[in-house]
Amino acid sequence: MALPRKVASANYMREREELFACPVCGSEMMVTEDCSIVCDNRHSFDIAKQGYVNFMTHAATSMYGKGLFEARKQVIESGLYAPMHTALCDLLKQMNTNVVVLDTGCGEGSHLASIKNEFQEQSDHSFVGVGIDIAKEGIIAAGRNYDDMIWCVGDLAKSPYQQTSFNAILNILSPANYTEFKRLLKPNGMVIKVVPQSGYLQQLRAMFFADSEKESYSNELTVERFKENFREVEIKRIAKTIAIDQELVPLLMHMTPMGWHQNNNDTAINLTEITIDLDILVGKI
Ligand SMILES: C[S@@+](CC[C@H](N)C(=O)[O-])C[C@H]1O[C@@H](n2cnc3c(N)ncnc32)[C@H](O)[C@@H]1O
Ligand SMILES: [Zn+2]
């Protein structure tokens, strides 16, 4: 009989417990037999029945709710982001080593799960995937849907991990904290940040923000800040327009908190194609 999710997750985390640092006092942590993660100073965090751990030390509000994460999961599973998954997987394979990968602002976890699957199909090296997000609803979904991964509710600016623990840090369409990322990376590690480019979801934006500055993105400042923080920066652009089924339209509109869907009748919108246009910024410490 299969082990309950909580016990299976505790076993998986115990084998990798050297990754954890107490978010209160910074000391080493142990995964106990009764499925808690406890530090030397007895600060304790329970593993939930869905297999994730909540490391938040203060309450946080999030504009990202359950419906948004369900929509994101379905859109990601439709294959819209497949070119990005392949590009990120290729970067990790090029490291030519076993990898421990942290996805910061992982949401409901499908990007990290897809990248891990692709990596394991194509490489003999091992892949340990760790995801952190401040939105509990996202991490609950990640824990429920993807096993053999480590899912944590926490703040990426003050993360519950030991220094120099990760070969790569992913940061996909999420806020970043470069001081923390540098603390967490192994010496030859890399940061991979994904930011929208000018054509990203342009068909939706054109519909809702016609004649306003929100109609197009510029990521110039983000790129500049990234270059100030990391060495050997390379930028790879992934742009693709694909045909979409009409059922995807309401999901596309619900996967962002920006409120494209507010005051609009989803079913009245007719979209036949959508553009994914992203810059992948890669840097070393
Ligand atoms: C646009 S979503 C992207 C989610 C996911 N990477 C994806 O592409 O589907 C941004 C994510 O960043 C998370 N986030 C924002 N601030 C954070 C913080 N301080 N620590 C951890 N996660 C954070 C949000 O909760 C949200 O899930
Ligand atoms: Zn502690």
Image (cartoon, grey):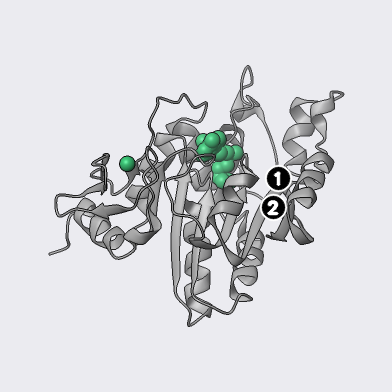
How many numbered marks does the figure carry?
2
Q: Is mark 2 within 8 Å of ligand 1?
A: no
Q: Which residue is mark 1?
A: 272
Q: Residues within 10 Å of mark 2 (few under 14, many from 20)?
A: few
Coordinates of residue 159 in the picture (x, y in percent): 47, 44
Compute the Cα span from label 2 to label 1. 6 Å
Front residue of 262 and 179? 179
Q: Residue furthest right?
A: 211
Residue at the image position 66 percent from the left and 62 percent from the top = 83
The answer to whether residue 65 is left or right of residue 196 is left
Of the two numbered discs 2 and 1 on the same chain, state the one appearing first in sequence.
2
Q: Residue furthest top?
A: 263
The answer to whether residue 174 is left or right of residue 283 is left
Residue at the image position 40 percent from the left and 27 percent from the top = 58
Helix or strand or loop: what does disc 1 sit on? loop
Coordinates of residue 31 in the picture (x, y in percent): 24, 54
**Can residue 77 be spotted in the picture?**
no
The answer to the question of whether label 2 and label 1 lie on touching residues, with beta carbons closer than 8 A, is yes
Q: What's the mark number on residue 243? A: 2
The amino acid marked with disc number 1 is Thr
Residue at the image position 77 percent from the left and 40 percent from the top = 202
Tell me the quadrant of the picture where the N terminus can be found. Answer: bottom left
Q: Is residue 125 above or below residue 241?
A: below
**Can residue 1 be spotted in the picture?**
yes
Q: Residues within 10 Å of mark 1 (few under 14, many from 20)?
A: few
